[in-house]
Amino acid sequence: MESIAAFDAKTRLSELLDRAAKGETFEITKHGRPVGKLGPPDSARDPKVVAEAVQRLKGYRGALKRMDRDDVVGLKHEGHRF
């Protein structure tokens, strides 16, 4: 993890955000003491994982076309006790 002074972080924020989006993490210091971190969000998505999920979803395309309204309603209530 790279340490960077708060003033430098302020002046280079756009560059640091671009690098954080690619997975880098930075420690922000003020007068030599750590005061914060800048890094990718926990919800950052791996493009490969997203592409695989999209392909899986595309596999379901047209699956409901063969079902009529009663079949869809039946699926909605599947597992209900009443």
Image: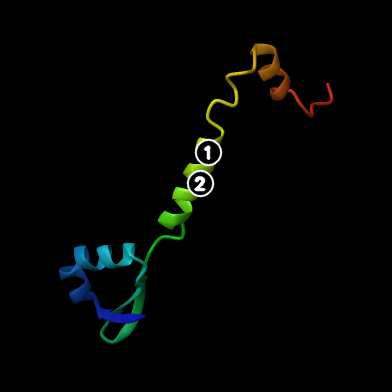
Residue farthest to the top, as pictured: 69
Q: Amino acid at mark 1?
A: Leu
Left or right: 69, with 5 as reference point: right
Whether residue 45 is visible, yes or no, is: no
Residue farthest to the bottom, as pictured: 32
User: Which residue in the protein does label 1 denote?
Assistant: 57
Image: 77 above or below 30: above
Secondary structure type for disc 1? helix
Q: Position of residue 45 (x, y in %)?
A: 43, 55
* Quadrant of the rendering where the C terminus is positioned: top right
Whether residue 1 is visible, yes or no, is: yes
Q: Spatial distance from mark 2 to mark 1, Cα to Cα?
A: 6 Å
Residue 75 quadrant: top right
Image: 31 above or below 50: below
Q: How is the image coloured?
A: rainbow
- Tell me whether the residue at label 2 lies in contact with that at label 1, contact meaning CB atoms closer than 8 angstroms: yes
Residue drawn at (50%, 36%) of the image:
58
Q: Which mark is residue 69?
A: none
Q: Position of residue 65 (x, y in %)?
A: 57, 19
Residue drawn at (41%, 60%) of the image:
41
Q: Residues within 10 Å of mark 1 (few under 14, many from 20)?
A: few
Image: 4 above or below 17: below
Q: Position of residue 30 (x, y in %)?
A: 27, 80
User: Which residue in the protein does label 2 denote?
Assistant: 53
Closer to us: 1 or 7? 1
Closer to us: 32 or 47? 47
Q: Position of residue 25 (x, y in %)?
A: 36, 73
* Quadrant of the rendering where the N terminus is positioned: bottom left
